[in-house]
């Protein structure tokens, strides 16, 4: 067993194949963890609650003895789970305490070599916060803007597959960035978003530019850091212009509203008062009837498009590059050509 710091872990990550193993309970793991970790829990949620209760109500010693009894029964399966993982193994718990220490000790006795992360997940979270607060990132932002349904996220993800330097805010937030944005998704919390963001930035830190979507300060449950908002505001703005019919089709394909009818209606109620009453009533009627194409088109025309048009007017003309296209594939091709010809380092 060897202890390892966050800094040493990150250095090792660049040179070797690593398996990060979070030994906290499933609920702790699902709340926030180090990206690309796997979960082999020392205790499940119920067992952790039992031990915690004994610790508070009885004594630390009684809690330890009960924990030892729980582990003794499942130790063979626990050890086997680690032996089935590849590469160098790094185990961690909340703050580098008993769970990771006991895990590492047992594995060492069984001949399985592991590293134990100093300070556990808490040290990683502190590193993320400190890094975001003190980031010195001299990279130009190319920002994708456009009316709702213009395929901005689709275009970014296609570019990312070709290894263009992309920051996918909606992907990291697991939210589409609108009132309807969480439908069919499980939005990430701030800790998960921050971790994914800094890992993404670290991977493209040396590139001359980065591609990002023109999101507002809040995306679902998360808030964007100020330095990223500043880069977005100061960057070159691609303004994608597509026919409303194309945008409507894209939204319906993306959201599949027939699968989430009640969620769509619930989300609509949150903006209903902001729309002219007769139009709002018609949109609600069309949603209830399952006439999604007409409902979406009305939402775009009378709610989302005016909001976007107001925001776009605030962007200086010398920062705008207009992308007029018949459909999303054509918009993607035009943007790619602009990047390759004008921004990409030769």
Image (spheres, rainbow, N blue to C red):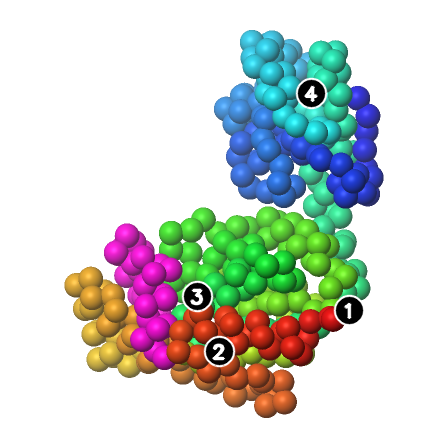
Q: Which label's residue is closer to the chain start, 2 or 3?
A: 3
Q: Position of residue 232 (x, y in %)?
A: 63, 73
Q: Give how far apart the Cα atoms at labels 2 and 4 are.
A: 53 Å
Q: Which label's residue is closer to the chain start, 4 or 1?
A: 4
Front position among marks 4 and 1: 1
| Callout 3–callout 1 Cβ contact below 8 Å | no
Q: Which residue is mark 2?
A: 240
Residue 42 in sight: no
User: Which quarter of the figure has residue 241?
Assistant: bottom left
Q: Position of residue 333 (x, y in %)?
A: 51, 72
Residue 87 is covered by the magenta coloring = no
**Quarter of the image containing the C terminus?**
bottom right
Left or right: 290, with 49 as reference point: left
Q: Which residue is mark 4?
A: 103
Q: Which mark is residue 178?
A: 3
Q: Which label's residue is closer to the chain start, 2 or 1?
A: 1
Residue 290's place in the image compared with 5, above or below, is below
Q: Which residue is mark 1?
A: 138
Left or right: 145, with 115 as reference point: left
- Determine the residue positioned at 50% across, 54% down: 174
Q: Position of residue 306 (x, y in %)?
A: 40, 83
Provide the major secondary structure of the magenta segment.
helix
Residue span colored magenta: 243-271
Assess disc 1: are there few (<14), some (14-19) or many (≥20) residues with their C-alpha within 10 Å of its C-alpha.
few
Q: Which label's residue is closer to the chain start, 3 or 1?
A: 1
Q: Give how far apart the Cα atoms at labels 4 and 1 are.
A: 42 Å
Which residue is at the far left?
289
Left or right: 152, with 271 as reference point: right
Nearest the camera: 289 or 98? 289
Residue 267 is covered by the magenta coloring = yes
């Amino acid at each position: 067993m060897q202890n390892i710091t966050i800094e040493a872990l990150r250095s090792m990550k660049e040179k070797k194949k690593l398996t990060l193993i979070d030994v906290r309970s499933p609920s702790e793991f699902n709340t926030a963890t180090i990206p690309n970790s796997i979960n082999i829990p020392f205790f499940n949620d119920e067992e952790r609650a039992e031990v915690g209760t004994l610790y508070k109500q009885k004594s630390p010693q009684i809690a330890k003895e009960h924990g030892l009894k729980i582990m003794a029964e499942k130790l063979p399966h626990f050890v086997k789970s680690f032996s089935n993982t590849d590469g160098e193994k790094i185990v961690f718990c909340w703050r580098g305490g008993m769970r990771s220490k006991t895990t590492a000790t047992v594995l060492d006795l069984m001949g399985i070599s592991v590293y134990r992360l100093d300070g556990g997940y808490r040290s990683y979270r502190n590193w993320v916060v400190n890094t975001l607060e003190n980031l010195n990132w001299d990279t130009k932002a190319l920002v994708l803007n456009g009316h709702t349904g213009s395929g901005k996220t689709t275009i970014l993800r296609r570019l990312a597959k070709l290894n263009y330097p992309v920051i996918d805010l909606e992907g990291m937030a697991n939210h589409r960035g609108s009132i309807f944005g969480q439908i069919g998704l499980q939005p990430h919390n701030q800790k998960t978003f921050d971790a994914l963001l800094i890992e993404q930035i670290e991977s493209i830190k040396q590139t001359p530019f980065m591609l990002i979507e023109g999101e507002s300060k809040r995306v679902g449950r998360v808030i964007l850091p100020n330095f990223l908002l500043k880069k977005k505001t100061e960057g070159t703005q691609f303004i994608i212009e597509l026919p409303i019919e194309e945008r409507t089709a894209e939204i319906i394909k993306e959201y599949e509203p027939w699968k989430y009818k009640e969620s769509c209606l619930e989300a609509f109620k949150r903006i209903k008062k902001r729309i002219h009453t007769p139009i709002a009533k018609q949109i609600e009627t069309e949603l209830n009837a399952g006439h999604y194409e007409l409902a979406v088109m009305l939402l775009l025309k009378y709610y989302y498009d005016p909001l976007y048009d107001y925001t776009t007017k605030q962007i200086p003309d010398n920062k705008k590059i207009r992308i007029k296209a018949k459909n999303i594939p054509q918009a993607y091709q035009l943007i790619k050509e602009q990047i390759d010809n004008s921004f990409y380092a030769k």
